[in-house]
């Protein structure tokens, strides 16, 4: 049971706000709500999220209003989102709670700030506690849906996808994504979404995305590559599920080159390093899996040999 749930209170106070992530953050609304002793136990020693939030990034300039918050989520809507939409309250709170349990904390603020728009912007975007652009908060900002359907195709996949980017670019207290040039925008997000659905008990959602991704093809690093079927799902299903996903980011934070302050990765990784680090995460040599999934070149072989020498503390 959630320790703090303001959905009913928010409606009673006439608030408008649900803040899921696409291209902006959130805004404030004024409310004066008396809290009982049970709800006051939430977010101990951390201030309540603001009632409104003025967006000030990209083309976003909405004053969004808080409609819900608890220990894990601060949700904002713009004026066009239907305030009868309440499923994100529990769903997104559960997503972020699971993320923190599997990947650790993301800065000091325990909450995911989510901004939802309706009929605006082309998609969604993330931001993290490293960035001033969104006021040093972990944010997802999404706009093209009505959010009335609690389904993967009704916007849920987008929301979890953007949360996956926060994990990708801000895990373990280090900024940036060394693997971005290799898996690009969506490949990591796909296995992340599947894992989130499984761990939240959303079996129908997990099966739907599994069926879709097992038949999905990409044109990188070669034509007809099946990233999910031939790479991520075998690693996930055979070597620890959510634990192996976390292991990859643990190894990056422990071993991959960073800037002088240790707060940001200093470069992107190559294919040999990618396979080496995932092998370390799985505890087994994944080169044969990579050869089957992606092909293999002399260049990658040389990179892989060098990676094993450079990062020789990673063993399998």
Image (spheres, rainbow, N blue to C red):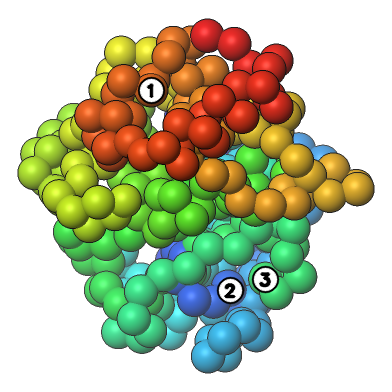
Q: Which mark is residue 134?
A: 3
Residue found 54% across the figure and 44% down from its top: 270
Which quadrant of the figure has residue 52? bottom right
Could you say whether the residue bearing mark 1 is in a helix, strand or loop? helix
- List the residue tagged with mark 1: 287
Q: Earlier in the sequence, mark 3 or mark 2?
A: 2
Quote the CA–CA distance across marks 3 and 2.
9 Å
Q: Quadrant of residue 197?
A: top left
Query: What percent of the width, then of the height, locates residue 226?
Result: 19, 42
Q: Earlier in the sequence, mark 1 or mark 2?
A: 2
Instruction: Tell me which corner region of the image, top left, top right, bottom left or bottom right, holds residue 128.
Output: bottom right
- Residue 119 sits above or below residue 90 on the image: below
Badge 3 density bin: few <14, some 14–19, many ≥20, Cα 10 Å: many
Q: Residues within 10 Å of mark 2 (few under 14, many from 20)?
A: many
Q: Horizontal and vertical percent for residue 187?
A: 34, 48
Task: Give the label, 3 or 2, closer to the camera.
Answer: 3
**Residue 16 rendering spot, x and y as whole percentages:** 46, 75
Tag in front: 1 or 2 = 1
Which of the marked residues, 3 or 1, is nearer the chain's N terminus? 3
- Work out whether 113 lies above or below 250: below
Dot 1, how many residues are within 10 Å of its Cα: few (below 14), some (14-19), or many (20+)? some
| SS state under label 3 | helix
Q: Reply above or below: 35 against 10.
A: above
Residue that appears at 17% across and 59% down: 153
Q: Are marks 3 and 1 in contact (CB under 8 Å)?
A: no
Pair 3/1: label in front: 1
Q: Which residue position is annotated with label 2?
A: 26
Q: Could you say which is closer to the camera, residue 156 or residue 162?
A: 162
Label 3–label 2 contact, CB within 8 A? no
Residue 37: mark = none
Mark 2: secondary structure: loop
Q: CA distance from mark 1 to mark 2?
A: 44 Å
């Amino acid at each position: 049971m959630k320790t703090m749930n303001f959905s009913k209170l928010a409606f009673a106070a006439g608030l408008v706000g649900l803040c899921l992530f696409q291209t902006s953050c959130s805004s404030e609304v004024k409310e004066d709500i008396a809290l009982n002793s049970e709800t006051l136990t939430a977010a101990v020693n951390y201030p309540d999220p603001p009632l409104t939030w003025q967006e000030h990034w990209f083309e976003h300039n909405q004053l969004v209003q808080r409609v819900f918050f608890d220990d894990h989520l601060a949700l904002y809507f713009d004026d066009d989102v239907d305030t009868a939409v309440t499923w994100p309250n529990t769903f997104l709170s559960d997503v972020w709670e699971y993320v923190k349990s599997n990947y650790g904390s993301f800065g000091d603020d325990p909450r995911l700030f989510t901004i939802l728009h309706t009929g605006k912007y082309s998609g969604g975007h993330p931001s993290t506690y490293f960035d001033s652009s969104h006021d040093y908060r972990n944010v997802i900002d999404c706009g093209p849906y009505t959010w009335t359907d609690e389904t993967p195709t009704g916007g849920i996949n987008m929301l979890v996808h953007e949360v996956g980017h926060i994990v990708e670019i801000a895990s373990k207290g280090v900024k940036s994504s060394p693997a971005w040039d290799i898996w690009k925008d969506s490949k990591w997000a796909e296995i992340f979404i599947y894992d989130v659905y499984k761990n939240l008990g959303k079996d129908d959602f997990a099966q739907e995305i599994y069926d879709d991704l097992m038949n999905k093809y990409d044109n990188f690093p070669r034509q007809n590559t099946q990233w999910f079927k031939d790479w991520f799902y075998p690693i996930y299903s055979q070597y620890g599920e959510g634990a192996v996903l976390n292991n990859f980011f643990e190894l990056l934070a422990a071993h991959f080159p960073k800037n002088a302050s240790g707060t940001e990765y200093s470069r992107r990784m190559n294919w040999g390093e990618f396979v080496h680090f995932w092998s370390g995460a799985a505890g087994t040599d994944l080169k044969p899996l990579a050869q089957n999934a992606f092909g293999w070149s002399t260049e990658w072989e040389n990179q892989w040999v060098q990676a094993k020498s450079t990062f020789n503390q990673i063993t399998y």
